[in-house]
Image (tube, helix red, strand yellow):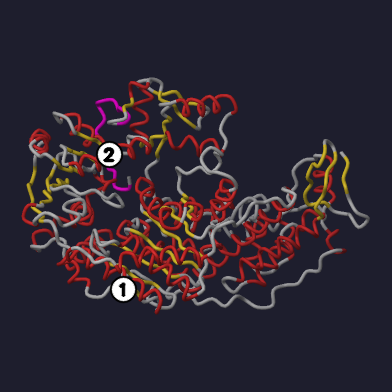
């Protein structure tokens, strides 16, 4: 092994093969300086540039040891090179960031911890190889002052814990980028997004198109009014926390984007992050943004996305989007509650790398009523902290605004963007809600069969499958996450086409159609559930207001087999429905959420996440903060040539992160007991513990998805 080096060379940080057996090197000093430059710039966005620089300057001091040099020059055994820098610095946030920059954030621990315990206190007691070689090249300078942080009322240690996480993110991304700069020989594809001025003009052209056209009817007139209010508030208001309470069909997606764009321009902000409840509705939002702003400027980041297939994205966009997925440097991010909040509470470098790029952003939480109740308080606390100390604007956007003010951090006022919201709800009221009471499946099927165009939404995938398969005639459709995302998209396209043509169209679905899916039926049936979901279902009825209100009915019915997980939602809905003639009024909605939160009480922070954050147990928080509590298993469906090629690649080379992301497009996710049924009946083959594959394609249809053995009882799809 030969190295290309200069006369001043002593210590190698990285090596890059230029020719077989000949390596170019990056010195430790060069890497420390390059990383420090990045980390300082990243942390400066939240007033901690000096802390970021300190992290970069000392994060790899352990590479000055002879043991590490032997490893990199002679392929020797692994060496702990991250603990050294943490031993030299006395600031806890910097110690934690440096010690965990490869292994992840850890629990702080206690002084009694021994060197083998996986805590920071234990880690600092480790005996590590002599790294004193740094003394000839690096001068240790302790940070002179603490970062200026506004404390969280009632939780004074929370802000410090959050700061540690953001500092860690700055170091991790800086380390990745500087290493990548060297390893690629300076050929890294970054940025390449259109300038904000260009994006602003494109959106302005679109909004002015709406505003200058003469609206037909009161609904379109009020949509324009909502849009104008969002534009005006975005221009005139500073950073802060806002609510956007707009009735279903009020055009809140584009209106909220317009508010965000004006905020960004007025306040010199960096990016817009759009957070959506779940993956099944993300495509429509991404497509609407791409149509206006161009696909290369929109990054979709969720569990089903893969940006490493050259056939999918032309030119340099693929490498650019792949990097942007890892560190969120794109101008507009569309992601999910799971991805956003689990990253904010994660401990691994892969999930935390992007966090520093949330600073100085506008974050829109679409369908804010879908914030997970078991983690509502820590979610709101993290939103408040981003507004308080990281120069963010947060917008809680929904048609059914939850009763959040009593739970939101008291020092962060929530301001409504739209005026006269109650009057808006009266104008946008296009449906009546009627109760059917308890019905059998046979009666429900008969009622659906008697309608020409109808949407029926039930609470479980098994119910959706059973009702759908019992329907007669043509024009019947099924939607649930038992189907692959690709097939759901195809079915939605057919449904829209038939609705527009006035053809028979009877759809049985789970709750996945209730948010972010534009459908317009004359009649909707909704199984008893949370009031917010019932009103969301109502948004799929008479959406454009073209039919008389009296003829546009949402029928609320009870069906046997209510999921246990809906117990509190059902109780809260049952408590408020008899009290209000207009169940979609703001007063009724607020009463529903107040009742629901009272029922859940201490369950709004079910895992004591805020307390654990203050205790600085980062790894414990990461393990406990899981928005989807139910363990799920993925089954791969090899439905076409592309899917079969991916399966062959998996069998040949085994799992890789990139390959599994591509395979996600052909996966169906199941709870453990349904997965076990398929396994018991030998319908699936387990591959390497990572993936299972459906053996017989007769057990999957495009129309209904995967077939589960009949003794299954079904399960809730509340976060489908």
Q: Residue at x 81, y 69 (%)?
A: 139
Q: Which mark is residue 715?
A: 2
**Is 618 situated left or right of 142 in this image?**
left
Query: Residue at left 44%, top 75%?
Result: 239
Magenta residue check for 358: no
Name, please, the residue furthest toward the right. Answer: 7
In front here: 509 or 566?
509
Answer left or right for 175 relative to 261. right
Name the spot of residue 169 as percent of width and height, x first: 59, 60
| Secondary structure category for the residue under label 2 | loop
On-image quarter of the N terminus: top right
Q: Tell me the mark number nearer the camera, choosing from 1 and 2.
A: 1
- 1 or 2: tag closer to the N-terminus: 1
Residue 52 position within the rendered picture, expressed as x and y whole percent measured from the top left: 65, 67
Q: Nearer the viewer, residue 534 or 612?
A: 534
The picture places residue 6, in percent across and down from the top left corner, at 91, 54
Say above or below: 524 vs 640.
below
Classify 494 as above or below 45.
above
What is the distance, in whole Å, between disc 1 and disc 2 at their CAs? 42 Å
Q: Which mark is residue 20?
A: none
Most foreground residue, 405 or 543: 543
Which of the labelled discs sits on residue 229, or is there none? 1
For label 2, the crowd category at 10 Å Cα-Cα, with few meaning under 14, some 14 to 19 and many 20 or more, is many
Residue furthest out toward the front = 213
On the image, the x and y values in percent for residue 598 come to 24, 63
Q: Quadrant of residue 466?
A: top left
Q: Residue, x 46% and y 76% (percent of image)?
A: 266
Which element type, helix, strand or loop, lies under badge 1? helix
- The magenta segment is 705-719
Classify mark 1: residues with Cα within 10 Å, few (<14), some (14-19) or many (20+).
some
Give the side of residue 127 with respect to residue 326, left or right.
Answer: right
């Amino acid at each position: 092994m030969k190295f290309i080096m200069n006369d001043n060379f002593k210590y190698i940080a990285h090596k890059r093969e230029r020719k077989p057996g000949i390596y170019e090197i990056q010195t430790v000093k060069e890497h420390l300086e390059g990383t420090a430059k990045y980390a300082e710039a990243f942390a400066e966005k939240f007033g901690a540039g000096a802390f970021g620089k300190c992290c970069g300057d000392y994060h790899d001091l352990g590479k000055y040891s002879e043991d590490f040099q032997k490893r990199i020059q002679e392929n020797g055994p692994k060496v702990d090179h991250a603990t050294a820098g943490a031993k030299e610095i006395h600031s806890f946030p910097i110690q934690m960031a440096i010690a965990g920059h490869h292994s992840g954030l850890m629990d702080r621990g206690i002084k009694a911890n021994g060197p083998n315990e996986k805590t920071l206190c234990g880690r600092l007691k480790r005996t590590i190889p002599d790294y004193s070689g740094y003394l000839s090249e690096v001068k240790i300078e302790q940070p002179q002052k603490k970062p200026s942080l506004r404390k969280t009322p009632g939780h004074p240690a929370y802000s410090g814990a959050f700061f540690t996480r953001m500092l860690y993110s700055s170091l991790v991304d800086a380390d990745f980028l500087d290493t990548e700069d060297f390893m690629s020989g300076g050929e890294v594809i970054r940025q390449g997004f259109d300038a904000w001025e260009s994006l602003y003009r494109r959106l302005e052209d679109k909004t002015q198109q709406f505003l200058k056209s003469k609206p037909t009817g009161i609904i379109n007139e009020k949509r324009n009014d909502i849009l104008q209010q969002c534009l005006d508030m975005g221009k005139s208001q500073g950073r802060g926390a806002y609510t956007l309470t707009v009735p279903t069909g009020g055009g809140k997606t584009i209106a909220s984007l317009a508010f965000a764009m004006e905020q960004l321009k007025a306040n010199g902000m960096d990016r817009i992050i759009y957070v959506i409840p779940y993956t099944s509705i993300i495509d429509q939002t991404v497509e609407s943004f791409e149509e206006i702003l161009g696909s290369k400027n929109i990054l979709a980041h969720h569990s089903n996305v893969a940006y490493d297939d050259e056939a999918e994205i032309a030119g340099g966009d693929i490498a650019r989007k792949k990097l942007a997925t890892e560190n969120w440097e794109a101008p507009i991010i569309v992601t999910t509650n799971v991805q956003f909040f689990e990253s904010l509470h994660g401990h691994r470098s892969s999930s935390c790398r992007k966090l520093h790029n949330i600073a100085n952003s506008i974050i829109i939480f679409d369908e804010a009523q879908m914030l997970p109740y078991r983690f509502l308080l820590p979610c709101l606390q993290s939103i408040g902290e981003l507004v308080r100390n990281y120069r963010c604007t947060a917008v809680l956007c929904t048609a059914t605004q939850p009763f959040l003010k009593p739970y939101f951090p008291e020092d962060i006022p929530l301001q409504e963007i739209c005026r006269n919201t109650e009057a808006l709800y009266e104008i946008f009221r296009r449906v009546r809600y009627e109760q059917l009471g308890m019905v059998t499946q046979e009666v429900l099927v008969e009622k659906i069969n008697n309608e020409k165009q109808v949407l029926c939404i039930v609470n479980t995938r098994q119910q959706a499958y059973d009702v759908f398969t019992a329907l007669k005639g043509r024009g019947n459709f099924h939607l649930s996450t038992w189907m692959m995302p690709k097939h759901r998209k195809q079915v939605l396209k057919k449904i829209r086409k038939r609705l527009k043509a006035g053809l028979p169209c009877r759809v049985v679905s789970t709750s996945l159609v209730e948010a972010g899916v534009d459908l317009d039926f004359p009649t909707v049936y909704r199984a008893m559930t949370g009031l917010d979901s019932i009103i969301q279902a109502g948004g799929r009825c008479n959406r454009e207001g073209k039919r008389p209100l009296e003829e546009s009915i949402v029928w609320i019915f009870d069906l046997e087999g209510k999921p246990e997980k809906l117990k509190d939602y059902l109780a809260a809905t049952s408590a408020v429905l008899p009290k209000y003639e207009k169940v979609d009024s703001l007063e009724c909605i607020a009463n529903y959420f107040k009742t629901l939160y009272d029922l859940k009480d201490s369950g709004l922070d079910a895992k004591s996440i805020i307390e654990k954050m203050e205790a600085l147990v980062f790894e414990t928080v990461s393990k406990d903060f899981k928005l989807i509590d139910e363990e799920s298993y993925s089954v791969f469906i090899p439905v076409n040539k592309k899917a079969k090629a991916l399966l062959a690649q998996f069998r040949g080379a085994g799992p890789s992160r990139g390959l599994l992301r591509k395979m996600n497009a052909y996966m169906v996710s199941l709870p453990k007991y349904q997965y076990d049924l398929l396994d018991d009946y030998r319908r699936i083959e387990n591959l390497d513990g990572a993936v299972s594959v459906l053996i017989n394609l007769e057990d999957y249809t495009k129309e209904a998805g995967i077939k589960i053995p009949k003794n299954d009882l079904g399960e809730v799809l509340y976060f489908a």
